[in-house]
Image (cartoon, grey):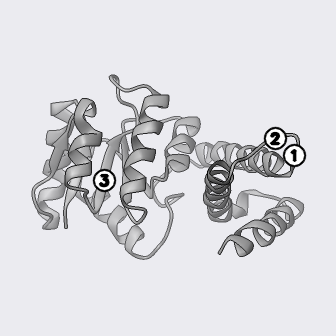
Amino acid sequence: MSVALICDDLDRARLVRHAMSPLGFPTLRVVPYAIATVELELAPPVILMFEGDSSVCSSSALYGLITSIQHLNPELIMIAIADNPSAQSLFSYLTLGAHAVFLSPFLPDGLEDIFQLIQQGIPFGEALLADSDRNKQLAVLIWDELLSLHQQLLDRTVYFGPIERAETEKQLERVLRMASSFGHYYDSETKKMIRTIFERYVMNIA
């Protein structure tokens, strides 16, 4: 199973490699941001780890990079790594398609928990984010993004070409899955709206 880490911080890469070694994974391939697209096109990984808080790659550049890599392998398992992300940052990792976030101090036990959750199909949430207040903030961000995407698809004044609409629907589906994961933070009326949007879009997309 090939594992790649997009990272320019050699110290951080060393810590992640150390966390992986007891788990029996093959050698971690560390790829600098500048050549990530070319390198990963030549040899796409099964698992891709990326720095969510990179000091050398802006958020917009990271989005473009991850999106291009996702097109190479839609089944790609992605894990963001970060030190102490805010709720807004966590949400941005989710919308990029991260299955989980590996938080510092990057210990083997934490990474093992992440892979177990991914194998079980459980998205990251309270099992990996201990701060309940942060989870509540994240739930609010998820709900706001869900409403925004839903409104975009309903607004007939917004033109979507086939590709743009498909991408927006895909993002909406991803955010709906997130909302389900954080469902216990929403009141009954909000849950009902989430279910209605899910039935309208996701079941039609599937």
For image coordinates 68% across by 43% down, the residue present is 141
For image coordinates 71% across by 45% down, the residue present is 145
Q: Secondary structure at mark 2?
A: loop
Number of the front mark, 2 or 3: 2
For image coordinates 13% across by 67% down, the residue present is 24
Q: Amino acid at mark 1?
A: Asp
Q: Secondary structure at mark 3?
A: strand
- The residue carrying pointer 3 sits among few (fewer than 14), some (14 to 19) or many (20 or more) residues within 10 Å by Cα, namely many
Q: Are marks 1 and 3 in contact (CB under 8 Å)?
A: no
Dividing the image into 4 quarters, which one contains the N terminus?
Answer: bottom left
User: Percent position (x, y) of residue 87?
Assistant: 57, 39
Is residue 101 visible to the viewer in this orientation of the structure?
A: no
66 in relation to 7, above or below: below
Q: CA distance from mark 1 to mark 2?
A: 6 Å
139 in relation to 183, above or below: above
Number of the front mark, 1 or 3: 1
Q: Which residue is mark 1?
A: 155
For image coordinates 64% across by 55% down, the residue present is 175
**Residue 13 left/right relative to 56:** left
Q: Amino acid at mark 2?
A: Val
Q: Are marks 1 and 2 in contact (CB under 8 Å)?
A: yes
Q: Secondary structure at mark 1?
A: loop
Dividing the image into 4 quarters, which one contains the C terminus?
Answer: bottom right
Is residue 68 visible to the viewer in this orientation of the structure?
A: yes
178 in relation to 94, above or below: below
Q: Which residue is mark 2?
A: 158
Q: Amino acid at mark 3?
A: Leu
Residue that lies at the very extreme toward the front in this rendered image: 161
Q: Which residue is mark 3?
A: 48
**Residue 168 left/right relative to 128:** right
Q: CA distance from mark 2 to mark 3?
A: 34 Å
Q: CA distance from mark 1 to mark 3?
A: 35 Å
